[in-house]
Image: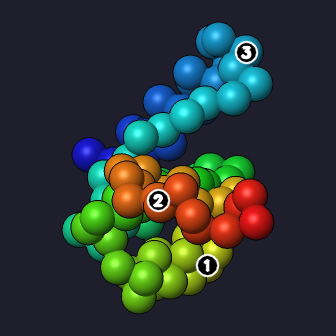
Amino acid sequence: MLTSKTIYHTLERLESDYAADLMVLDLPPLLVGDDTRAVLKDVDCAMLVARADATTVPQIDLCEREIVEHTNMLGIVLNRCRDIDDDYGYYE
């Protein structure tokens, strides 16, 4: 569905109908299929969300390279990050 021309026209219509300054799309994982890659070429920028306890650094690197091939990269959000010690160096 995301690879069809319908999604492009739907995004254009939503943008014009609602005079949207910002639209946030929650897309499928980049490494699972081609749908997200197909949408990246039609957006102004993208933010990568990675799960700390499941996503590897090589996977993050690969996703970052994929994103910048198609659009601007805003940054990375690391979620499910739970194991931070009190003595990690911030207050030293």
Outermost residue toward the bottom in this view: 58
Task: Mark 1 or mark 2: name the one nearer the start of the chain.
Answer: 1
| Residue labelled with disc 3 | 19
Q: Is residue 51 above or below residue 26?
A: below
SS assignment at label 1: helix
- Work out how far the residue at label 3 is from the one at label 2, CA to CA, in angstroms: 42 Å
- Work out how far the residue at label 1 is from the one at label 2, CA to CA, in angstroms: 33 Å
Q: Is residue 61 above or below residue 16?
A: below
Q: Position of residue 69 (x, y in %)?
A: 61, 78
| Residue labelled with disc 1 | 69
Q: Position of residue 6 (x, y in %)?
A: 39, 39
Q: Is residue 8 above or below residue 67?
A: above
| Crowd around label 2: few <14 · some 14–19 · many ≥20 (10 Å) | few
| Residue labelled with disc 2 | 84
Residue 9 visible, this angle:
no
Q: Amino acid at mark 1?
A: Glu
